[in-house]
Image (cartoon, helix red, strand yellow):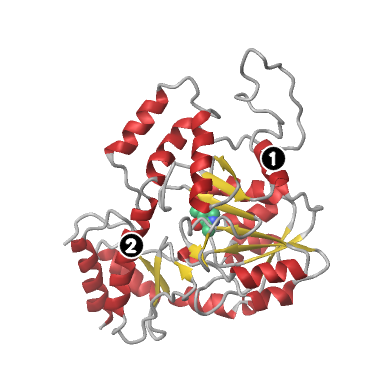
Amino acid sequence: MSDKIIPYGMHEMPNEDKDSVWYALGNDWITSGPLVKKFEEEICKQTNAKYCVALSSGTAALEVAVASIQFPKGSEIITTPYTFMATSNSIIYNHHIPIFADITKDTYCIDPEKIKEKITKKTKAIIAVDFAGHPAELEELANIAKENNLFLIEDAAHSFGAEYKNQKIGNIAELTTFSFHPVKHITTGEGGAITTNNEELYKRMQCLRNHGIDKDAFQRFGKDKGYMYDMMNLGRNYRIPDFNCALGLSQIKRLDKIIEKRTKIAETYSKSFSNIKGIKVPTIKDHVKHAWHIYPILLPEEISRDEIFLKMREKNIGVNVHYIPIYKFTYYKNNFNFNEIDYPNTEKIFKRTITLPLHTKLTEEQVKYIISTVNSILT
Ligand SMILES: *Cc1c(COP(=O)(O)O)cnc(C)c1O
């Protein structure tokens, strides 16, 4: 059927989005201006968080979130090995030590019980990831954090718009980070955000995004403003341009619809695959609203994932693997001492997992084609 590969993830760009960017390009401010503020306000509305800092990527959001808490160098931060490397890299950028805890067998999010085993005197924080858009066990994590005096950071790059026990993601952990890369729910080209209810951290993060300077250009502009500013912390340039925020502002209006469409496709997949022996479709816990960033299934144990992967790609289905466990990467091997036998669930799931295309531009015909291809290859 398909003569062009169907990607696993894809943004949408209707004319209203292009108009919004075009209009923004005519403004006097094309970076650090009023549209950044407006985009942050919309993210607050969406998440019910008090404060939001928008910045240049989800990776920058993670780095700044960790930096804002100002732990002593060499602190330990516990996170999942089953994520995009930006999650654990944010710990290393800040001169701290990443400690991995294994994931659960059902949602592939970090296992609260495994975190408990890894806590030492040097542990300062937990970074959870809402894998595939399914919120992590946030209540258990918040309890562990409280009992052990740790910060809870949530990497919600997959879960913008998700809910946990009727609360919006973005308003639960002390700091929640988002990504607006084109494969994510909404895009700004490149971009990210951090939400928090903590005013002190909010102010520090605004500053860290802009070289550690206490006032940005917009705040120093005007008749009654002076030239003075101070550099408070060692920040970087992680600012996001106004026209990227114009795109985000246009896209965020459709977030509910986008999640609705992704949910429908995921449900169609799960229903169709439930009768193929040995396939495990994603688990959804009762207390969550899933945001469906990706659709990963586990293949039957006796089958080679890599073989299926090649067969699907041959049929122009852009399957992917989420994720290669972080401790397998050369950099991590060269710099740390992680041992894969400590992560049995991660190992088992990684071996069997394959991600099928999931995005709003998939047509019904393509979804049918993907389902029938999976069926014919596996049965
Ligand atoms: C996409 C992603 C990031 C990084 O976001 P960028 O905007 O690409 O920098 C971080 N963590 C996870 C889990 C992601 O999926």
Residue under label 2: 357
Front-most of residues 335 and 65: 65
Q: Quadrant of the N terminus?
A: bottom left
Q: Is 277 on the left or on the right of 34, as rendered?
A: left
Q: Residue at x 56, y 77 (%)?
A: 104
Percent position of residue 379, x then y: 25, 83
Of circles 1 and 2, the one toward us is 1
Front-most of residues 205 and 351: 205
Residue 75's label in the rendered image is none
Q: Residue at x 22, y 77 (%)?
A: 376
Q: Tag 2: Cα neighbours inside 10 Å, few (<14), some, or many (≥20)?
A: many
- Quarter-of-image position of residue 111: bottom right
Percent position of residue 151, x then y: 71, 60
Per the model, the C-alpha gap separating discs 1 and 2 is 39 Å
Q: Residue at x 28, y 71 (%)?
A: 268
Residue under label 1: 203
Percent position of residue 265, x then y: 30, 65
Percent position of residue 264, x then y: 30, 65
Q: Residue at x 42, y 60 (%)?
A: 293
Q: Does residue 26 sit above or below 323 in this rendering?
A: above
Which label's residue is closer to the chain start, 1 or 2?
A: 1
